[in-house]
Image (tube, helix red, strand yellow):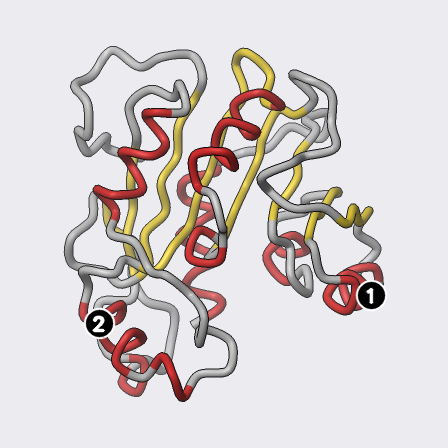
Amino acid sequence: MFNTELEAIKKMLGQVHPKHRCIEIGVGTGRFTEGLHIIYGLDPSIEMLKKTRERKIICIQAVAENLPFKDKSFDIIMMATVDCFLTNLQQAFAEIDRTLKPDGRFILAKIDRDSELGKAYEKKQQDNRFYRYAKFHSVDEISEYIHEANFGDLATVQTLFRSLEMIEDVEPVRCGYGEGGFVVLGEKKEKMTVHKYSKINIS
């Protein structure tokens, strides 16, 4: 499952220049950060950051709603399965907009609440220690929040099309959303000349 999710994020992220300043918000134990060769990670949990530091990642303890960075600090900001834990989505996305460079990129990976996987997670939520207090969102709902924070049109890719019990290898990654349980949204601050919510082809 992790390798499949990582491939979907890589599909959206594309080639990252070594000089780009990148950070993962809600870094957790740093698995995605390490796999994507991102240098910086931010998380409110000291215990999580202890594990992240073991991966040689530069760690910052803070919350997404109050980023301790100057304006226009990063070329890329990435967030994976974190939206469901944020207390104030509008404030978090406004902070991301503030700290991204004018031509920077925002990548958000999430569990789609409207997918079969999202429904299964919600059904077993009380029995899942990790997602017990999570509030899952649909892709359209998250898209609306991102647009309200001054971002433009979103590209999307999706994966995890079967139940987790059936997945034995890396799943395919396809454009758009609505079928896969894991969806990655990407946006450049340099506005794209396409219609709102259009599904942009990622080659």
- Residue 145: name its quadrant: top left
- Amino acid on which the number 2 mark rests in the picture: Lys
Which residue is found at the position 43% from the left and 34% from the top?
90
Left or right of 56 in this view: 73: left
Report the residue marked by disc 1. Answer: 50
Classify mark 1: residues with Cα within 10 Å, few (<14), some (14-19) or many (20+): some
Task: Tell me if residue 203 can be seen.
Answer: no
- Amino acid on which the number 1 mark rests in the picture: Lys
| Count of numbered circles on the image | 2
Mark 1 in CB contact with mark 2 (< 8 angstroms): no
Report the residue marked by disc 2. Answer: 119
Against 190, residue 68 (above or below) is below
Task: Tell me if residue 136 can be seen.
Answer: yes
Against 1, residue 154 (above or below) is above
Which residue is found at the position 44% from the left and 83% from the top?
128
Residue 130 position in % (x across, y down): 51, 76
Left or right of 131 in this view: 20: right
